[in-house]
Image: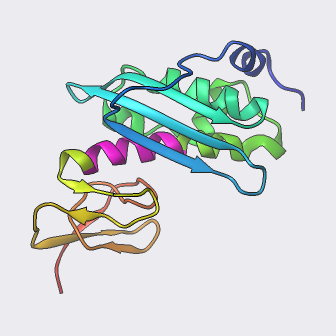
Amino acid sequence: MQYSETVMEHFKSPHNVGTMESPDGVGQVGNPVCGDMMKIMIKVKDDKIDDIKFETFGCGAAIAVSSMVTDMAKGKTLEEAMQITNKSVAEQLGGLPKNKMHCSNLGADALQKAIQDYIDRKEGRVRKRPDEGLEHLDSHEKHCYCPYCDYDQPEEAPFCVRCGKPTVERDQD
């Protein structure tokens, strides 16, 4: 399968590329197998993604995916943006070759991580480094469980810090 015209347009003239000063949320992902790295930065206003930028180091498909996912998310509510999937990104691009589908996963994952980072910061949870666990600024009596990746989060969070999907609240044991 060749790249679609839409993929080529987003590769040659990517939208929303660049850095952002003082972003409200940052999501960074990478694929060690192919070497692609994506970083998405968001500014949120009135629960909507007001501005979004990306930096991507990778193949043409990775750049096109980053451009498309930022176009799809801009102006959406956080809840709407969390519904953007690898499949919807690939469909908007007119398809991707099978060996490049992992790029659409990276784009959706980076967006969801940026949104989760914004939510964590807003609710008083911070990371000193991206690979570090969350540190609470406030104490909570409940924690949340992610049924998608079978992970008990030691704090309340509407979305899983690992996969970005909705959590289920549980009383602490």
Quadrant of image for the N terminus: top right
Most prominent secondary structure in the magenta stretch? helix
Viewer-proximal residue among 61 and 145 = 61
60 versus 159 height, above or below: above
Name the residue at 61% across, 45% down.
106
Name the residue at 54% across, 39% down.
39
Name the residue at 27% across, 55% down.
126
Q: Quadrant of residue 152?
A: bottom left
57 versus 172 height, above or below: above
Whether the magenta-drawn stretch holds residue 39 is answered as no
Find residue 10 and report its horizontal and vertical position in percent: 69, 18
Tally of marks: 0
Find residue 54 and report its horizontal and vertical position in percent: 54, 29
Q: Where does the magenta region start and end?
A: 109-120
Name the residue at 16% across, 81% down.
172
11 versus 135 height, above or below: above
Find residue 153 and report its horizontal and vertical position in percent: 31, 71
Q: Please identify the residue farthest to the bottom as the structure is shown.
A: 173
Q: Is residue 126 left or right of residue 53?
A: left
Find residue 135 and report its horizontal and vertical position in percent: 25, 65
Q: Quadrant of residue 14?
A: top right
Quadrant of image for the C terminus: bottom left
